[in-house]
Amino acid sequence: MKILVAVKRVVDYNVKIRVKADETGVDTANVKMSMNPFDEIAVEEAIRIKEAGKAEEVVVVSLGVAQCQETIRYALALGADRGILVQTDDALQPLAVAKLLKFIVDRETPELVILGKQAIDDDSNQTGQMLAALLEWPQATFASKVELGDGDARVTREIDGGLETIKVGLPAVITTDLRLNEPRYAKLPNIMKAKKKPLEVVPAADTGVDITARLVTLKVTEPPQREAGIKVASVMELLDKLRNEAKVI
Ligand code: AMP
């Protein structure tokens, strides 16, 4: 079995985001970029399936600028076998990503595609669902446990008030939730070895896929500043303020 994993290069989750002065987006100049955390979980799951002898190959795909190769190399250092970069300098929205991924899936014919449930930069939570729809494959989103059977996968999902387990026939699209696994770190020798693993670059323009943006960002703004708190002298004063000023009791 071949597993395809989508890995997105995003602003590192530890970075304090700065909004551009003209409110057109987030400042990414000189900012540390990393693999989307949910995609690290997706890579980890694929590698564990391979280590368990249930898959022969793990292929990682990233879409975007040339620097996404770093994200792919990291996945290769973690244990993926091969990488594909669909390269473009254009900003990609989820529908365009899903269409480009479909192009790669049609070419690679994997039995399983694993994505993160959401990218921490756009928080769209759309790509996996759109990809499944375009492929007309079943989807199991927000997976917290994946067990592969003979031609199917049992996927446990955290839902309100409990755990839901569903069965999907393969090929299928799975998206990862936080508790699916704890990703490993790349070891130095593996980082060196990853440099020699195959990484193919496919210009997005060569795919024939229409990646035109469908949504217009009107503006991006900072959240409102939190106001400083005040100290009250007594419980009675607190109650008075809550009742008469904040009007919450
Ligand atoms: P989103 O729908 O944007 O929240 O993204 C959900 C998932 O789709 C991510 O966790 C990735 O697995 C995948 N994805 C989205 N954009 C890209 C991209 N540019 N390159 C690779 N994978 C992506």
Image (cartoon, helix red, strand yellow):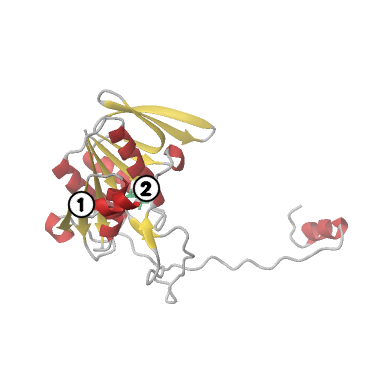
Residue at disc 1, secondary structure: strand
Residue pictured at 37% horizontal, 58% vertical? 34
Distance between the alpha carbons at the discs numbered 2 and 1: 16 Å
Residue pictured at 47% horizontal, 35% vertical? 158
How would you rate the neighbour count of disc 1 (Cα within 10 Å): few for under 14, some for 14-19, many for 20 or more? Answer: many
Side of 95 where 203 appears, left or right: left
| Earlier residue among tags 2 and 1 | 2
Q: Which amino acid does label 1 sit on?
A: Ile
Residue 243 x %, y %? 79, 57
Residue pictured at 40% horizontal, 70% vertical? 27
Is residue 219 visible to the viewer in this orientation of the structure? yes
Could you say which is closer to the camera, residue 148 or residue 212?
Answer: 148
Residue 66 x %, y %? 24, 63
Residue at disc 2, secondary structure: helix
> Residue 84 shows which numbered tag?
1
- How many discs appear? 2
Where is residue 201, by image quadrant? bottom left
How would you rate the neighbour count of disc 2 (Cα within 10 Å): few for under 14, some for 14-19, many for 20 or more? Answer: many
Residue 208 x %, y %? 13, 56
Residue pictured at 87% horizontal, 57% vertical? 236
Residue 198 x %, y %? 17, 51
Q: Which amino acid does label 2 sit on?
A: Glu
Q: Do the residues labelled 2 and 1 touch (CB within 8 Å)?
A: no
Q: Disc 1 beta carbon < 8 A from ligand 1?
A: no
Is residue 96 visible to the viewer in this orientation of the structure? no
Compared to residue 123, the image places residue 156 above or below, namely above
Could you say which is closer to the camera, residue 203 or residue 75?
Answer: 75
Side of 221 where 60 appears, left or right: left
Side of 61 where 117 appears, left or right: right
Quadrant including the N terminus? top left
Residue with the mark numbered 2: 40
